[in-house]
Amino acid sequence: MSFALSSEQEEFRDTLRRFFAESSPSTEVRRLMDTDRGFDDGVWKQMAEEIGLQGVVIPEASGGQGLSFAELALALGEMGRVLHPSPFLGSVVLAGRAVAHAASEAERSELLPAIAAGELATLAIAEPDVGRWDARGISLEATPAGDGVRLSGSKSFVLDGHTAARLLVVARTPGSRGEEGIGLYLVEGNATGLSRSRLDTLDATRRLARVELDAVEARPLGDPGNAWPALEHALCEASVALCAEMLGGMEHVLETSVEYARTRHQFGRAIGSFQAVKHMCADLLIGLEGARAAVDVAVDAVVENDPELPLLASIARAHCNEAYYRAARDNIQIHGGLGATYEFDAHLYLRRAKSSQQILGDTSFHRELIATELDRATA
Amino acid sequence: MKRKDTPEEAAFRSEARSWLDANAELRRGEGDWSNGPRVHTHEAEAEYFDRCRTWQRTKFDGGWACIAWPRKYGGRGGSAAQEIIYAQEEAAFDVTSGFLPASISLMGPALMRHGNEAQRERFLTPLQRGDEVWCQLFSEPEAGSDLAALRTRAELVDGEFIVNGQKLWTTSAQFADYGFLLARSNPDVPKHAGISFLLVDMSDPGVDVRPLPTCKGDRHFNEVFFTDVRIPVSNVVGEIDGGWAVAKTTLANESMAIGSGRRGRDTTAALVRFARDRGRWSDPLTRQRVATAYTQERVLGFLQDKLQQALLDGRSPDVDGSVMKVLWSETRSLKAEIGLDIQGAEGLLFGGDAFDRGFWQELVLDRPMGSIGGGTHEVHRNGIGERALGLPREPRVDREVAFRDLKTSMDGGTSK
Ligand SMILES: Cc1cc2nc3c(=O)[nH]c(=O)nc-3n(C[C@H](O)[C@H](O)[C@H](O)COP(=O)(O)OP(=O)(O)OC[C@H]3O[C@@H](n4cnc5c(N)ncnc54)[C@H](O)[C@@H]3O)c2cc1C
C-alpha cells in the first residue's frame, strides 16, 4: 500500500463504500442488533457471491480472489465505517488466517474454499475468566483418542461462536506449558458434546458466544503441538485487520463531529468556532492521522512478511485503541444531549470502540508486548 | 516503508554516500558532537555553533546544501526527492548544521518568492553557505501568537526606515549577522496591512542583543532592542506595508520543518537502558509508559515517512504541518517526563550531580521549545481545526480597526 492507494484499490474501496452504505444503513444495523444471529444472510451471501469479499485474500486455487492483505484491510475499513454487523472478523479474518498459517496444504485446500464461499467458521481461543489471546491463556487440553483427539473444557469470547458451522479450537497437549504443545483442532458445529450459548455484548453489532466442550471429537490440523508460532502470526494479522476496521470507524466519527461542529449553532455562532470544541476535533485528527499511518505500515508488514510484524501490529493496536475510543467518546461530547440518546448512533461507535480495545489483547497487553520487544532491541 | 529507488535515485544516493564517506565520520552514539553541546557555557555553545557552520560550508562547497533550490539561486537544481535521499544518507553521519537549515528554510523561500534580483544576488549564497547567519525578528512583548499586533516602528524618512522597538525570544540572535524583521510602517490601517519585512544588519550600532536565559538555563534566545536603526529602502522585501504576505511564506514552512525534522538521538533506547540501570525496568507501570511513548514515537516516524513518500512520489504532502508539530512536541515531552520519573528522588538533582548530567531534567524544562516556540500548541490546534478540518474561525474584533485604535494588554488591567 505504501501510504497511497493504487487506482484499482481506490475503485475497490469506492465500490465497497457504496455497497455497505446501501446494505448497512443505521436502520438495518439496529434491526440486526436485536436478532439472534446478528447479521443478514442475504447481505452475507451477496458479499460472498457478488463481490467475493470472504475470499479476498484466499488464493484463487482455493476459490478466493487471491488479492493482498491491503484489500482485506480496505474492506474492513468500509465495514467499520458503518458498523456493518457480520461474522467477517471471526470467520474470514480469525478462522481464515489461522487455517492459512497453521493448517497443512491439503487441509487448506479443503477448508479455505468453504470460508471463501461464506460458510461460517470461527476461532475459539480465549477462555472464560482468563480472557487472554496468547499461549499463556490456553488451558483446554486435547486428549488423544483414536485418530483424533477429544476436547473437554470451555472457551469464551468466541466471535459468532453460536452460529459458526465449524469451530477451530486452540488447545494444548496434556501437561504442556507456555507456547509448547499448542495445537489447532477442527470441531464440527453439530458435534456431540458441544454446547454453545450467545452472550450479551457491550457492542451489540458483534456476536460473542461461550462454548462448552464435553469430550468432543476433534480433528487435529497442521502440526498439532507446534502450532503456536503460526497462530501467533494469524493473531497479529487479525490485530492489524481489527485496526483497519477501527480506522474506518474513526474516520466516520470524525466526519460526524466536524459536520456537527460546523452546523450546530449556539450563542449565535457555530459550535466549531469555540476553541474547546475546535481543539477536541483537532486532537481527533491528530489521532486519526497517526492511525492511518500506523495501519498502512502494519498492513505493509503483513504483505511483505516483515519480521517486525508483531511489533508493528502491537504499535498499531496500542495507538488505534486509544485514538478510536477517544474519538468515539468526544464525538458524543461534541453532540451534547443528542449524543447521549439511544436513538442517535454515536453510542454505537462508542460501544464498538470500547469493545475493540478489549478483544484480541487489550491495550496494556499490547504495550507489554512492545516493552518485551524493546527488551530484546536494547539487550 | 520499503520503497525501492528508481535507477536515477539509486545513482544519486550512492553519489551522496560517497561524498559523505569522504567528508564525514559515521555516527557512534552518545558521545557524538552532533548531539549538541554537553554544557551550556558560552564557549561550548560557540564551539558547537562553529562546527555546525563549518559543516554547512563543506556541504555548500560540495554542492549538497539546498539541493532542491534552483541553480540560479545557488542551489543544486535537484528535486525534493533528492533532498530526502541526501538527508537519509546524512543521518548516518556525525554531522549537523544546527539551526542553520531552519533559518535557511525560513529565509530562502521568502527571498526567492518575494525578494528582488539585487537582494537575491546579495544574500542567497552567503545564507546557504552559513557565511551569514540569520535570525527571525518577529515576536515582541505584545505580539506573540498575535504576531500582526507587533509595535516595533519603522518610519520612512528620506528613503530610509528608522526603526525603534523591541523584539523578544529571538533564537540565536547572538550568532546572527542579519535578521529579518517585521516592523510597523503604517499604524493608520488595520494591523495586517501596515507591516513591512526588512533586512537588518545586526552589527548596526543601534541594535542591542541581550541574552535571555531559557528556563532550562541555556542561551537559546535573546531580547533585541532597536534604537534609531537605519535600514535602506532597498532592504525591504516585497512591498512597503506588504510584509505580512512575506511573513506568511516563512511561517508556512516553519511548523512542517519542526515536526518533520530529522530524528535526533534515539531517546527510547536510552530510556530503556536508563530504566534498567535504575532497576525500574521490571516495574509494569514504567514498562507501560515507555511502551506508550515508543508507540507515539514510532507513529510520528510513520507520518514522517509518509510525508517523505509523498514528496518522493511527487504528490503534495497529505498531513497538515501543525499535526506533525504538535505530535512531535508531545512525544518529546512525554519521554522527558518518563525519564525524570524513573529517577525517583534522584530526579531532584540537576547538572553534574544528576544522572546522565541531568539530560532528562533538561528535557523536561525544554518542553516550551516544542509547545510554545514556532507557535503554541493552542494556536496550532486552531490551525488544524480551521485549515485542515474547515471549522469556522472565531469572531474577531481586530480585522477592520486601524492598528492604533486596538486594545492591548498595556491599556491596563482586566478586560471588561
Ligand atoms: C524556544 C523558543 C524559541 C523562539 N524563537 C523565536 C524566534 O527565533 N523568533 C521569534 O520571532 N519568536 C520566537 N519565539 C517566540 C514564539 O513564537 C512565541 O513565544 C509564541 O508565538 C507565543 O507568543 P507569546 O510568547 O507572546 O505568548 P502569547 O501569544 O501571549 O500566548 C500566551 C498563552 O495564550 C494562548 N493563546 C494566545 N492566543 C491564543 C488563541 N488565539 N487561541 C488560543 N490560545 C491562545 C497561547 O497558546 C499561550 O498559552 C520563540 C519561542 C520559544 C519558546
Image (tube, rainbow, N blue to C red):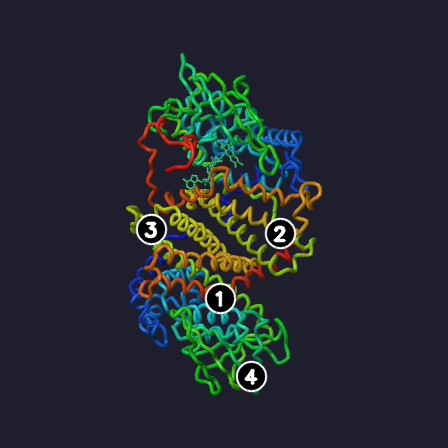
Instruction: Look at mark 1 in the image and give the residue it sits on.
Output: A358
Mark sitting on residue A261? 3
For the residue marked with disc 1, what is the amino acid?
Gln
Q: Position of residue A255 (x, y in %)?
A: 35, 54
Mark sitting on residue B341? 2
Residue situated in front as seen by the camera: A363 or B7: A363
For the residue marked with disc 2, what is the amino acid?
Asp
The mark total stands at: 4
Residue situated in front as seen by the camera: B176 or B402: B402
Q: Nearer the viewer, mark 1 or mark 2?
A: 2
Chain to which the residue tagged by mark 2 belongs: B
Q: Nearer the viewer, mark 1 or mark 3?
A: 3
Q: Tags 2 and 4 in contact by the CB under 8 Å rule?
A: no
Please tell me whether mark 3 sits on a helix, a strand or a loop.
helix
Residue A12 lies left or right of residue B51; in this view the side is left
Separation (CA) of disc 4 from disc 3? 59 Å
Instruction: Look at mark 4 in the image and give the residue it sits on.
Output: A149
Separation (CA) of disc 1 from disc 2? 28 Å
Q: Disc 3, ligand 1: is the CB inside 8 Å? A: no
Chain to which the residue tagged by mark 4 belongs: A
